[in-house]
Amino acid sequence: MYICVCNALTESDIRSAETAGAATHGEVFRHFGVRPQCGRCFSSMRGMMGCSGACGERRHADDAVAVTRMTRRDGR
């Protein structure tokens, strides 16, 4: 089934990009060397890739933990 009609990307294409390391819809587009057009496919891609609200947050979760452990400038 086509997920992105503008760029002719299918479910199989999305899975292939995900297997190659794509974690966001932007990375899927970059994987195939195309750009998003209308944006209607974003929610379908997020659903396929297991992302909630902002696709890609799972990749940055470890960064957030590191920041919370930092000491403020005033020493607290």
Image (cartoon, helix red, strand yellow):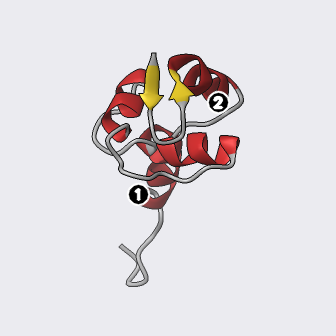
- Residue at coordinates 48% horizontally, 51% vertically from top-left? 36
Dot 1 alpha-carbon crowd within 10 angstroms: few under 14, some 14 to 19, many 20 or more: few
Quadrant (top left, top right, bottom left, bottom right) of the C terminus: bottom left
Q: Give the amino acid type for the residue marked by disc 1 in the picture.
A: Thr
Q: Quadrant of residue 18?
A: top right
Residue 37 position, x and y percent, is 43, 53
Amino acid bearing label 2: Ala
Check the picture and name the quadrant holding the N terminus. top left
The residue wearing badge 2 is 17
- Lower sequence index among marks 2 and 1: 2
Label total for image: 2
Relative to residue 16, is residue 41 drawn left or right? left
- Label 2 close to label 1 by CB (< 8 Å): no
- Where disc 1 sits, the SS reads helix
Q: Taking 26 as reference, is 51 left or right?
A: left
At mark 2, the secondary structure is helix
Using the image as rendered, state which of residue 32 and residue 53 is in the foreground.
32
Residue 50's tag is: none
Between 50 and 69, the one lying in front of the other is 50
Q: Pointer 1: what residue?
A: 68
Residue 25 in percent (x, y) is at: 49, 42
User: How would you rate the neighbour count of disc 2 (Cα within 10 Å): few for under 14, some for 14-19, many for 20 or more?
Assistant: many
Please tell me whether residue 72 is drawn above or below residue 1 in the rendered image: below
What residue is shown at x 53% (from left), y 23% (from top)?
Answer: 10
Instruction: Please state if 56 lies on the left or on the right of 35 as rendered.
Output: left
- Closest to the camera, between mark 2 and mark 1, is 2
**Residue at the spot 68% in from the left edge and 49% down from the top edge:** 33
Residue at image position (68%, 42%) is 31
Image coords of residue 63 (percent x, y) = 52, 52
Position of residue 26 measured from the top left corner of the image (x, y, whole percent): 52, 49
**CA–CA distance between discs 2 and 1?**
32 Å
